[in-house]
Image (cartoon, grey):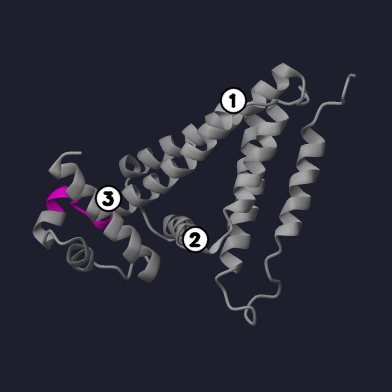
């Protein structure tokens, strides 16, 4: 890694830490520069706007997710087994270690809902999500090919359902875990997500022909 790349990485890590602690809007470029150490003028040369840093932070998180999904895709087993592993990864992601990541992803979605972000900046995030969806789709298609997953729906539609329905449910449960229990009506229960996983797998799994 070159000095330039290392400096850029430090800036992104500093932004990720501060965004998780204070939110996107309340974090200033000066604070990020102070945390990373290069000086605010240098920070602006690398990232002209705070939104540039925000996008880099989100894409770095999605890249981590992509790495997990790639490992699942390369693993041994039928498509339905790999799909179950995808669900398990989502569920296992609810932990103290990943609290900041969940908060950042949720905060990013809220930011997009109430702010205007240049389409060119969002393109990188869209590409990252598309890579994840393509991997999930490939796993579903693999299951349809090996006969472990029903072939009555297009793999792309199933992949979208998994990401939208199950992924959103996991993020919500993760978010509830950081909110005081006296504020939310229900507390997170991983067993509910496991039941949802079982229901979705039951709908996907092809009958055993043996």
Q: Is residue 50 magenta?
A: yes
Quarter of the C terminus within the rendering: top right
Residue 31: give x, y in percent of width and height: 22, 68
Alpha carbon distance from label 1 to label 3: 31 Å
Q: Which residue is mark 2?
A: 97
Q: Residue at x 20, y 60 (%)?
A: 36
Residue 196 visible in the current orientation: yes
- How many residues crowd around disc 3 within 10 Å: few (fewer than 14), some, or many (20 or more)? some
Q: Using residue 42 as the reference point, say whether residue 123 is left or right of it.
A: right
Determine whether 18 is above or below 74 in the image.
below
Mark in the foreground, 1 or 3 = 1
Magenta part, dominant SS = helix
The numbered dot on residue 52 is 3
Which element is circle 3 on?
A: helix
Determine whether 64 is above or below 95 in the image.
above
Magenta stretch in the rendered image: 44-52
Q: Residue at x 29, y 59 (%)?
A: 15
Mark in the foreground, 2 or 3 = 2
Determine whether 162 is above or below 95 in the image.
above
Earlier-in-chain disc, 2 versus 1: 2
Mark in the foreground, 2 or 1 = 2
Q: Is residue 21 magenta?
A: no
Q: Which residue is mark 1?
A: 138
């Amino acid at each position: 890694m070159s000095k330039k790349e290392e400096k850029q990485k430090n800036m992104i890590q500093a932004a990720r830490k501060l965004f998780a602690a204070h939110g996107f809007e309340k974090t200033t470029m000066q604070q990020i520069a102070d945390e990373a150490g290069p000086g605010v003028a240098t920070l602006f040369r690398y990232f002209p706007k705070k939104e540039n840093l925000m996008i880099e932070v989100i894409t770095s998180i999605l890249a981590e997710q992509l790495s997990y999904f790639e490992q699942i895709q390369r693993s041994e087993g039928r498509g339905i087994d790999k799909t179950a592993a995808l669900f398990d990864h989502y569920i296992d992601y609810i932990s103290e270690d990943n609290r900041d990541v969940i908060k950042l992803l949720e905060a990013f979605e809220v930011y997009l809902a109430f702010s205007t972000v240049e389409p060119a900046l969002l393109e990188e995030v869209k590409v990252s999500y598309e890579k994840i969806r393509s991997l999930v789709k490939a796993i579903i298609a693999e299951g349809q090919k090996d006969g472990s997953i029903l072939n009555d729906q297009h793999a792309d539609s199933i992949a979208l359902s998994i990401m939208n329905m199950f992924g959103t449910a996991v993020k919500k449960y993760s978010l509830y875990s950081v909110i005081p229990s006296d504020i939310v009506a229900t507390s997170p229960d991983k067993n509910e997500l496991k039941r949802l996983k079982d229901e979705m797998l039951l709908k996907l799994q092809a009958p055993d022909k043996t």
